[in-house]
Image: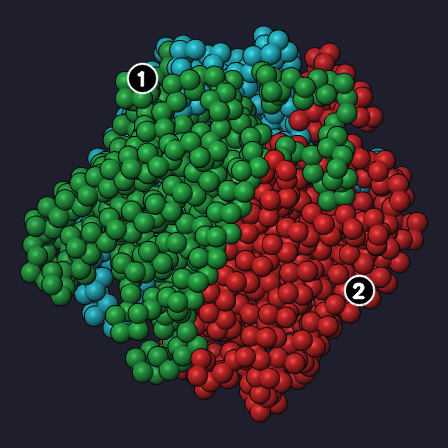
Chain colours: A green, B cyan, C red
Amino acid sequence: NSWLTLRTHLFCFVWQIAMIILFGVFIRYDKESNAHWVETKAHDNITSDIENDFYFRYPSFQDVHVMIFVGFGFLMTFLKRYSFGAVGFNFLIASFGLQWALLMQGWFHSLDPQTGKIFIGVESLINADFCVAGCLIAYGAVLGKVSPVQLLVMTLFGVTLFAVEEYIILNLLHARDAGGSMVIHTFGGYYGLAISRVLYRPNLHQSKRMQGSVYHSDTFAMIGTLFLWMFWPSFNSAITDHGDGQHRAVINTYLCLASTVLTTVAISSLSQKTGKLDMVHIQNSTLAGGVALGTAAEFMISPYGALIVGFFCGIISTMGYIFISPFLEKTLKIQDTCGIHNLHAMPGVIGGIVGAITAAAASESVYGKQGLINTFDFTGDFKDRTVLTQGGYQAAGMCVSIVFGVVGGAIVGSILKLPIWGDPADENCFDDEVYWEYPSHSGVQQPHDPQAARPVSPFSMLCLTISHKSLVIC
Amino acid sequence: NSWLTLRTHLFCFVWQIAMIILFGVFIRYDKESNAHWVETKAHDNITSDIENDFYFRYPSFQDVHVMIFVGFGFLMTFLKRYSFGAVGFNFLIASFGLQWALLMQGWFHSLDPQTGKIFIGVESLINADFCVAGCLIAYGAVLGKVSPVQLLVMTLFGVTLFAVEEYIILNLLHARDAGGSMVIHTFGGYYGLAISRVLYRPNLHQSKRMQGSVYHSDTFAMIGTLFLWMFWPSFNSAITDHGDGQHRAVINTYLCLASTVLTTVAISSLSQKTGKLDMVHIQNSTLAGGVALGTAAEFMISPYGALIVGFFCGIISTMGYIFISPFLEKTLKIQDTCGIHNLHAMPGVIGGIVGAITAAAASESVYGKQGLINTFDFTGDFKDRTVLTQGGYQAAGMCVSIVFGVVGGAIVGSILKLPIWGDPADENCFDDEVYWEYPSHSGVQQPHDPQAARPVSPFSMLCLTISHKSLVIC
Amino acid sequence: NSWLTLRTHLFCFVWQIAMIILFGVFIRYDKESNAHWVETKAHDNITSDIENDFYFRYPSFQDVHVMIFVGFGFLMTFLKRYSFGAVGFNFLIASFGLQWALLMQGWFHSLDPQTGKIFIGVESLINADFCVAGCLIAYGAVLGKVSPVQLLVMTLFGVTLFAVEEYIILNLLHARDAGGSMVIHTFGGYYGLAISRVLYRPNLHQSKRMQGSVYHSDTFAMIGTLFLWMFWPSFNSAITDHGDGQHRAVINTYLCLASTVLTTVAISSLSQKTGKLDMVHIQNSTLAGGVALGTAAEFMISPYGALIVGFFCGIISTMGYIFISPFLEKTLKIQDTCGIHNLHAMPGVIGGIVGAITAAAASESVYGKQGLINTFDFTGDFKDRTVLTQGGYQAAGMCVSIVFGVVGGAIVGSILKLPIWGDPADENCFDDEVYWEYPSHSGVQQPHDPQAARPVSPFSMLCLTISHKSLVIC
C-alpha cells in the first residue's frame, strides 16, 4: 500500500520534471505569440493585430478545453460512487497528456529543422487538447477498473501512438480529418477497447453493487453530455481553414447533432416495452453525430447531408448500447464501462467512411476551383491529386487508425496487466474509496479527527459502518 | 402504453425524415460558409477572412447555445424528481425545434426569390436558437404535466407561430427587437400560459408530494440560472449591428442584470417574516432584467437607464412569484410550474414598453445622424420614418406578440387536450418514472437484472417499494 | 430578527438607488460602444468594425464572467449544507460589487478631466469583474460565518480599497499586473484573512457537524474548480496587449496550470499514509499556478518557465493545506474556511516575486526593442525606465498590495465585529437554514402550507424534526 503511494506521486514528480527539461530544450513561442510580433507584422505587411491567429481560434479553443475537462470529466460521473475518480483522474491525465502531446506532436509535425525547436501557438494548444481526447476516450472503457498510475502509463503511450498515427494519416497520406473521426475517435476507441480486453476481469460481478447510477449522478453526467454536445461545433471547426472552413464546419456539426438527438430518443423509447427513455442513451448516443462528422464537417456535405449522417448515427449508436455492448462483454470479453464502442469507435469508423465518400464525390462545380484546392489542401507535393485518389487515401487513413488502436492497445494492455500497478480488486471496482479520502473535509476541520465533519446521528453512523458491504444512499 | 411508445418514436422518426427532405429541397450554405467564399472575397474586395460574419457572431452564438441547452434545461431541474424530464425533454424539443425554425424562419425572412432556396450562416443558427427559446419558455409553464409527444407538438406549432409573428413584427412593422423581449419572451410566455390554462388540472394536488425541490435539485437549478444570467449579454447582442451595436447591448444587459439581483434579494427577504431568502426568487427573478432589456439593449438607453430597468424588474418579478402566481392559479386556473409569467411574460411586456419609449425618445444629438439610421435601420422603405412613429410601431409589435401568444396558445392547447397524447395522470405529474427508466444502468450491467445496479440493503429496498406512494429520499 | 430583515433589504435598496444616481451623474458609453462609432471610425481611419476593442476582448470577458459567478460560486459549495449561501451570496455581492467597481475604478483610472465623466467599454467590464474577484476571494475566508449584510459591507470597502491600491500599483508605481497576482489575489487574500482574524470565533467547534463536505457537494465544487481552471488563461490574458500579449498570456497560463495539477496530486497522495487523494487539494491547489502567473503571464517567461512556476505552486499550495492552515488556526487564530491563504495569498505573493524577477531579467534580445516597450509600456513618463528599475517597482507593488490587504482587512474587520450585523451564532455557522427558506417550493405550491412540497413519509418527517440538532442526510 505504501508502495502504491510511492508510485503515484513518484510518477507525477518524475514526469513533470521530465516535461520541464524537455520543454526547456525544445519548446518556444511561435512568431504570433512572441514579443517580436510587432516586427513580424511590419515584415509581413499585417495591418492589424486582429489578423493574429489567436483571434481566429481562441473562442473555439476555450470551447474544446471545456469539452476535455468538464465534458469528458462529467460525462463519466454517472456511476453512483465514482464521481471523484471520473472528474479527478480525467483532470490528472488530461493535464499530463497535453504537455506530452505538445512535445510529441511538435517533434512529428512542426520541428523546425534549422533551430531544432518546436514553436507553439494557439493551434498547438488545440491539437494538444485533441490528442488528449483520444486518451480520455480510452479511459471511458476502463473507468473504475484501473489505478491512477495505470492511467498515467496509458496516457503516456496513448499520446505517443496518437502522434505517430496522426503523422501518418495527416502528413504522409495527406488525409483530411479536422474533427478527428479517424485520428481521435476511431484510434481512441479501439485503443481503449483493446486495453479493456487484455485487462478482462472475469469476476467483475463482485462489484455489481457499485455498477449503475443514482438519480443525482445521472444529472451530473448530463452536464458533461450537454457541454460536449453544445461545443462540438467548435471541436470540429477549431483547426479548419479560416473563413468559410470554420463557418461550414460549425453549421454541419450543429445540424448533424440535432438530428442525432431525435433518432436516439426514438430508438431508446422503442427499445423498452414500456416506451420509457434510458438515460444511458440520452447521455451518450446523442453525441455520436458529432463524432461521425469529424472528418466531413469542413466539406460541402450540404445541410441535409449532415442531417442524414446524424439520423443514422443516433440509430446505430443507441442500438449499440442495446445489442452490441452485451455481445462484446459476453462473447469478446470486452468490458466497456462507458460504452465507448458505441459513442466513439463505431461512429468514428462511420465518420471515416463518410469522409472518404464525400471527398471522392467532391467536384469543382460545388467547391469552385480554388475552393477545392483550399478545402483539400491540394498544394505542394499534392497539387495534382484528384478527389477520387483523395477518397482512397481517406479510407486508407481510417485503416491506419484502427490498426494503431487495436495493436497499440493490445501491447499497452499487456504492460498494464503486470501486477505492479496497484489496480483495484474485483470487489472494489467502481468505488472512489480505494483512491480518495472520503468526504470529511473543511477548511477549519481538525485534521486528525475523521469524525469531525461527518453527520453524527446514529442512522448515518450505521450507514458508514455498513457502506463497505452493500448500502449506498443516494 | 405500447400505443404511447409507438407515438413517441414515430413522431421523432417521421419528423426527422421530413426535416431531411425539406432541408434537401430548401437549405443551402450562404456565401460566407460556402467553399466559393474565396471568390466572394475577391469580388467584394474583402481583404481578410476575419471579416467573415462568423468571427463577429460565433462567440455570442456559443453562449446562446449554452443558454438554450444548459441554461433552460438546468433551470427547470429544481423539482425533486423531474430533473431527467427537465434536462432531457428540453434537449429533445430544442433539437427538433431548431431544425424546424431554420425552415420556417428561412421561408419567411430569407427565401431567395430567384433560386427558391434558403441560405444559412451563423446568424441563422442564432435565430433558430432564439426561436426555440420561445418554445422552451412555454415548456416552463407545463413542466411535469405533459408527455414528450405533447411537447413535440407544442414545439411544432410554437415555432410556426413564432416565425409568423416575428415576420409581422420585424419585417412588416419594422420594429426593432434584437434580444426578443416581444418576439421571444412575451410570445413564449403567453403561449405557455394559454396552453397551461386550457390543460388546467383541477386535481393536480394529487401529485403534491412531487411538487417542490430538495437541497441538491435547487443547487442544480442554480447552474441553469447562472449560465442564463452570465450569458444574457451575449443573447441580447448576438444579432445586433457589428461594432457599437453589439458592444452597447452587452454593457446595457450586464448592468441591468446586476441591478436586478439586488432588488430581487431585497424583495425576497422582505417577503418573509424571518427575512430569509427564497431560492425560487433567486433562481428566476434575477433574470428578469435580461428579458426586459431585450428590445432596448442596443439603444442608447444609457448605463443608468439600464440600471433603472433592472431595478424595477427585480421588484416586479419577485412580487409576481409572491402575489400573482397564487392569484393566477386560484382565480384564472393557470398552473404555471416555473412561474414563466413572472420571468418571461411580464418582464417581456415591460421590455416592449421600455423599447417603445426609448425609441420614441431617440434623438440625433444622442445617436448622431448616421448612428440613428444604423440603430433603427431607417433605410429602404423606412428611410423617412421618424423616431416617434418608430415608437408607435414598437408598441404595435408588442400587441402582436401578446395576441399570437394568447390566441395561438389557446388553439394549440385545445389540440393538446385531445385524449390521445399519453399525458400523465394527475397523481403522476412531476415524476420522472412515468417517462424514464429509473437509475439502474451501467456499461457492464446485466440488462435483464433490474436489481443489478440498485442498492440492495433492506432500507433501500423499502424505499423502492414505497416510492410510488409517498417517500422520496434526497 | 425583523431588524435583520430590515437591514438586508434596506442595504440592497439604498445601495442600488445610490448606484443609479451615481451612474446617472458619471457613467457614459465610451466611443467604441457609442452610436457615434460610425463617426469615430471615419475620423480615425478604422477600416472595419472588427477593429472595435469588443472583438479583441469579448470572448475573454465572458470566460472571466463565468469564473466570477460559476467558478467562485460553485468552488465554495463543498460544505454539506452551505451551497445556497455559497452560490447565492456570491451572486449577490458580485452583482453589487461590479457596479461599485465601475465607479471606483472609473474615478481613479479613467475620469475624463474635461467632462467629468467616466466612459466605459468592454475593458471596463472586465476590470470590474476583476475587482469583484478580490472581494470574492475574501469571502472564501469567512464563508459560513457572516451575514449577507456583513458581506455587502465587506464588498463596499473591499472594492474601495481595491481601486486605491490598484491605482497606486498600476498607475503611480507603473507596475505590470495583467492577471492580478498582486492587485487581485494578494490583496484579496490578505484582506479576507485579516477580517477572519478580527472575527475569530473561539467556539466555532459548536458547528462542527456542519463543517465538511458530502459526496455530492464535493462534486458540485468540482464544477467551480474546473471552470476556474479552464478559463484562467482568459483571466490572465483578458486585458493584456492585443496580439502577441494576449496570445502569450494564454499559452503561459495553460502550461503553468497543467503542471500544477501533477504536483498537487503528488503531494496530496504523499500526505496520506494510505496514498489516497484529498478532494480539498484537488479542488483548490490545482488553481494555484494560475494565481502565481497573474503578473508574469504576459512576459516572455518562456514555456518551461511557466511549467516551473506551476510545479512549485502545486507543491506549496498543497503543503499549505496540510501544514499551514492548521497552524494559522491554532496559533494565529485565523479561521480560513476555504483555505484562501493557500490558494490566493501565498501564490499571489509568489506571483509578485516571479513577476519582479522576470521583469528585471527582461532583455532586448528576447523581447526586441519595440516588444520591450510594448510589454512593459515604457512610454510617456516611463520611457526611460530600465528593466531593473521595473523589477524594483514590481516588488514595491507587491508590498503595497499586502499592506492594503492586512491593514484594510483589520479596519473593515473591526467594523464588521460591531454587534449590529445579524451574524449567525457559533452553533449555526455553515448552515443555510439561517438565511434561506429550506426546500419546500414549487410554482404551483400552496404558499401557506409548508408541508406541501415536502416528502411526507414518517422517516423524512423524522429527519426534518431532528435536523436542527444533528442529522444531515446526503
Could you tell me which chain the residue with mark 1 belongs to? A
Write down the quadrant of residue A101 in the picture.
Answer: bottom left
Q: Would you call the spot at circle 2 few (<14 residues within 10 Å), some (14-19), or many (20 or more)?
A: many
What is the secondary structure assignment of the residue under circle 1? helix
Q: Is residue A341 left or right of residue B464?
A: left
Q: Is residue B398 above or below residue A325?
A: below
Q: Nearer the viewer, residue C329 or A175?
A: C329
Q: What amino acid is labelled 1 in the image?
A: Lys
The N terminus of chain A, quarter of image: top right
Point out residue A459 in the picture as x, y percentages from the top left corner: 73, 18
Q: Which residue is mark 1?
A: A330
What is the secondary structure assignment of the residue under circle 2? helix
Q: Nearer the viewer, residue B226 or A129?
A: A129
Residue at 11% of width from left, 63% of height from top? A381
Q: Is residue C136 above or below residue B361?
A: above
Q: Nearer the viewer, residue C64 or C442?
A: C64
Q: Which residue is mark 2?
A: C406
Residue at 78% of width from left, 56% of height from top? C193
Q: What amino acid is labelled 2 in the image?
A: Val
